[in-house]
Amino acid sequence: MRDRYKIFIIDEAHMVTSAGFNALLKIVEEPPEHIKFIFATTEPDKVIGTIRSRTHHYPFRLVPPEPLMAYLELLCRQENVPVAPGVLSLVIRAGGGSVRDSLSVLDQLMAGAGPNGLDYELAVALLGYTHASLLDDVVEAVAASDAATVFRAVDRVIQTGHDPRRFVEDLLERFRDLIIVQAMPESAHAILRGMPADQIARLHNQAHNLGAAELSRAADVTNTALTEMTGATSPRLHLELLCARILLPSSEQNERGMAARIDRVERRLNYAGNDVGTPATAAPAAAAVPAAPVPATAPAATPATAPQRPQEPAVQEPPAQSAPTHPASATSTPAQSGTGTSAVPAPAPGSAGNTAPTEPGCSRRARHR
């Protein structure tokens, strides 16, 4: 009687049957002035169309991580509870953007916290998430193609009682973080809120070691495996097959697998540094060295002088001095002095045969004259 309106809130309105909505339809269509109806539901598509057409729809959205992070930090300061770096980001992730769920998770952590406050190890253990160090080992082993380390990590997940599906979710989350760091290396902290600076630095190194194509392929393969693991009877087998597919990009005969293999080859060339080009530049120089002496030691000079040695006693010094006066002896002088060896590489045998008998004849004619 005191209030102006009487408000009826029907929570979980999608659970109301069609008969129940039909019973409410008349009063919803023509309500009294002092009555207001509020239908709260997370599945508005299940509310019958006659009710939805007569109501206003006000969607409630999830709280963004940034204001929710500030609110949780304020609560922890008011409660005098120390919080380790990275814990509140896990709380927000567990809450899924819901303030109520995030506060429930934070209450659970505070109830199990010790005198040192909210520790990262405790938060990971209580929430069931995969430790960041284990994810670091897996990602670095994938970048180095170290299959032994990857499968040891999988065995550690199983032996410690972790859910394989949760591990795959965390691995997919890590690949998403690496893609963000690779896309915006200078301002990744603006999106990865609450993550410690040293962890972001490690993500930078991992994103550099993993190429863009191989990182995208690993995320796609992990997402597909996560979908296939729903209701699987052997989640460990699916997890091990996932690791095998990530480690073997050649298993995919498509553009994505080819791009991943090219990225792997480029990374190996970058690791090798400038040493890769050294043999390529040294090989032509080494090949040119033995080729240089070949013209200098051509076999044409040897046959040209060899036949003349038996006939040298017949040629005496005086005719040799008068030889420049004869035209034929002038043409034969370069052959005897050896200065024209480079001019006769190919026709050396024929020219040598023609010159050897002519020179003694010229000298005889010179003596006769």
Image: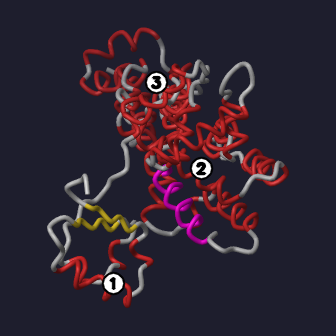
- Confirm or deny contact between disc 1 and disc 3 (CB under 8 A): no
Rounded to the nearest angstrom, the CA distance separating label 1 from label 3 is 43 Å
Q: Give the residue type at disc 2.
A: Leu
Q: 350 left or right of 261?
A: left
Position above or below: 15 against 309: below
The label shown at residue 74 is 3
- Quadrant placement of the N terminus: bottom left
Residue 298 coordinates in the image, percent (x, y): 50, 32
Q: Nearer the viewer, residue 126 or 207?
A: 126
Residue that mark 2 sits on: 171
Residue numbers of the magenta segment = 214-228
In what element is the residue under mark 1?
Answer: helix
Residue 166 coordinates in the image, percent (x, y): 65, 55
**Of pointers 2 and 1, the one earlier in the residue sequence:** 1
Q: 170 left or right of 212?
A: right
Q: Nearer the viewer, residue 134 or 51?
A: 51
